[in-house]
Amino acid sequence: MTVAGRLEIPADTRALLFDMDGVLIDSLAQDIQIAADLLSPYAGRPVEVPRELIQRWFALALDDFWAKITAELGLALKPTELAEIVQRHTEVRLHAVPIVHDGVREIIDAARQIGLSLAVVSNNPAADIERMLAACALLAGFDAVVGNDQPGLARKPAPDPYLAAAARLGLPPGDCAAIEDSVLGLESARRAGCFTIGVATGASSYDDLVHSGLADVCYRDFRGEG
């Protein structure tokens, strides 16, 4: 079955499960732009945060993301300082209007038209996901949102988020196709038993997605032909 002329999924698929950052919205570009500004005041000097470093840990929740970034840059920040950076980063995300990746709206609209259920499965708190998707007029297209703050739910790469999304839709994971931009996210979806789709518009390159062996199919983007 082809959705919007650009996404191939098994014929018996009943739901699409989307990661948010890097799949639905281009939050990577925003993070690359603001990372140095957020970190430099705490380092006491101008700090350059390489794009490759941001991309490497982009799929993580913000608290884990900043812990990895500061550790790799050799910056010893207090837990309270890390928490402040996470809070400031969250505020930037929530006040910005997210940029929706090309082709995403077409896929969502087409999926709804053919009766597929849709959910978002993200390493962000559910309320933040809903605010960001509402800001770019995507939220209404989804039947469920699974964040990283549900009690007892382990974060990706554990299978828990995708298992929870399938359960929320009343479907077995095998009836769901999961769309991820990172190897970490693909691992989560594969372990849950979903059909896995990689798209190289965020954390991982096309080659990394393909060579991970975790994606059933990979795309460079969802812009479609022409």
Image (tube, grey):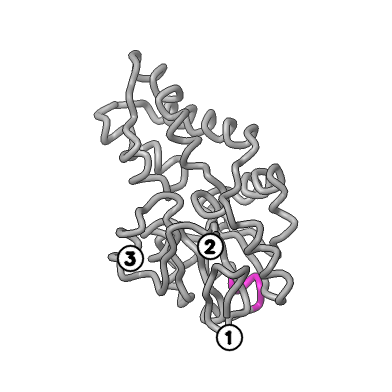
Q: Which residue does the image show at 37% across and 39% down from the upper left?
A: 54
The kind of secondary structure element at disc 1 is loop
Q: Where residue 225 sits: x, y (%)?
A: 53, 62
**Residues tagged 1 and 3 counted as in contact (Cβ below 8 A):** no
Lower sequence index among marks 1 and 3 = 1
Q: Which residue does the image show at 44% across and 22% down from the upper left?
A: 37
Q: Where residue 117 sits: x, y (%)?
A: 67, 72
Residue type highlighted by circle 2: Glu
Check the image and report above or below for 12 versus 190.
below
Lower sequence index among marks 3 and 2 = 3
The residue pinned by badge 3 equals 210
- Residues at marks 1 and 3, CA–CA distance in whole angstroms: 23 Å
Residue 12: which disc? 1
Residue type highlighted by circle 3: Val
Count of number-bearing discs = 3
The residue pinned by badge 2 equals 225
Q: Is residue 194 magenta?
A: no
Q: Marks 3 and 2: which is nearer the front?
A: 2
Q: Quadrant of the C terminus?
A: bottom right
Q: Where residue 108 sits: x, y (%)?
A: 66, 63
**Residues tagged 3 and 2 counted as in contact (Cβ below 8 A):** no
